[in-house]
Amino acid sequence: MGVQPAVAQHETASDLVSGGNAFRQYCANCHGPDGDLIAQVDLGHNNFRQPYSDAQLVGIIMNGIPGTPMPSTPRITETQAGMLVAWLRSLGEREASLAGDVARGRTIFEGRGECLDCHMINGTGSVLGPDLSSIALVRSSDELRDSLLAPSAIVQPNNRFYSVVTKAGEAVTGRLLNHDAFSVQLLDQNQRLRYFDKSTLDDFGFSDPDMPTLGADYSEQDVADLVAYMASLRRGAAQ
Ligand code: HEC
Ligand code: HEC
């Protein structure tokens, strides 16, 4: 029986994208977006419990690990599994060049980053921006990095900013909580819940998000540290 090499030697960028998509489709709900949600198992940092070959990893994906909760994935093809493995390996390589320090990241977050001015973590901070207490459960490190370096690219619909001007001339900008044909509810800059009847408004609409882009005074290391800290935030996850 001829054995095909499971992983092409030179996977293309689009293979890696397919591998990442397959991971999100078949694996991320258990292993988390970065592959390290299950205690003692870390798929995304080239930190496997054994020095598996690519072919062995493909075997694990297709057949599961008998006697454990790691299931087989009957719908995945061997080619897709190979792309998935290549993607996991590429994550590990990227990570190695940018190892962040959780404690240092936290110091920046709470100190000169002034992130708590807008974000809440485990009950500390502000509700102006999204609560980040369990952000690692829904965002990969790559996405977290993007939200620091290109914030307007990633706006969650329920995190959008909205501005109104009342007929009395008051201008209020805040995080949109709810709106319909007749009314708007905002959380204003002083974190007060504001309710407006649209008939009392001169003007209203979405405004640009206020998440500041990190300035040039942040080094690559600072960014990696912040990302490492946020990637550790997973309140409520079964560990
Ligand atoms: C139903 C939840 C679940 C799903 C879905 C799942 N896994 Fe797992 N996986 C586990 C658990 C739990 C373990 C640990 C098993 C053990 O106790 O040895 C594991 C272990 C592994 C291991 C062994 C890691 C090591 O260091 O030994 C690999 C590799 C792995 N999973 C890859 C994947 C990939 C890739 C996918 C998607 C194709 C996937 N898993 C889907 C739950 C899951
Ligand atoms: C002036 C307020 C403000 C400050 C200061 C601020 N943020 Fe934000 N941040 C926001 C808002 C608003 C959003 C949601 C809209 C968006 O994504 O642009 C957001 C989004 C985010 C997201 C994406 C959340 C998601 O759901 O994907 C991350 C991660 C984040 N911020 C991290 C940080 C870090 C780290 C700092 C400090 C260096 C920081 N923010 C400083 C307002 C702020």
Image (tube, rainbow, N blue to C red):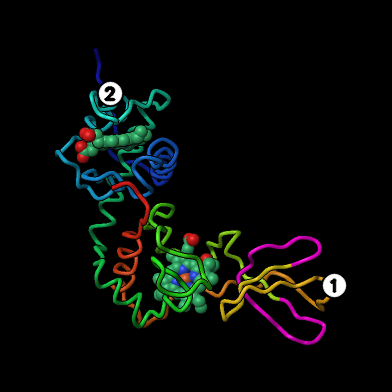
- Label 1 neighbour load within 10 Å: few <14, some 14-19, many 20+: few
Q: Cβ–Cβ below 8 Å for labels 2 and 1?
A: no
Q: Which kind of residue does numbered mark 1 sit on?
A: Ser
Please determine whether, in this image, residue 173 is positioned above or below residue 81. below
Q: Is residue 147 visible?
A: no
Identity of the residue drawn at 29% across and 30% down: 69
Please determine whether, in this image, residue 116 is positioned above or below residue 28. below
Please determine whether, in this image, residue 6 is positioned above or below residue 13. above
Question: Residue 199 — which label?
Answer: 1
- How many marks can you see? 2
Q: Where does the magenta region start and end? A: 164-183
Identity of the residue drawn at 42% across and 58% down: 135
Please determine whether, in this image, residue 168 is positioned above or below residue 105. below
The local secondary structure at tag 2 comes to loop
> Which of the two marks, 2 or 1, is nearer to us in this view?
1
User: Could you tell me residue 56's position as x and y percent?
Assistant: 21, 30
User: Could you tell me residue 10's position as x and y percent?
Assistant: 31, 41
User: Could you tell me residue 233's position as x and y percent?
Assistant: 35, 60
> What secondary structure characterizes most of the magenta part?
strand
Q: Nearer the viewer, residue 124 or 87?
A: 124
Q: Which kind of residue does numbered mark 2 sit on?
A: Gln
Residue topped by disc 2? 4
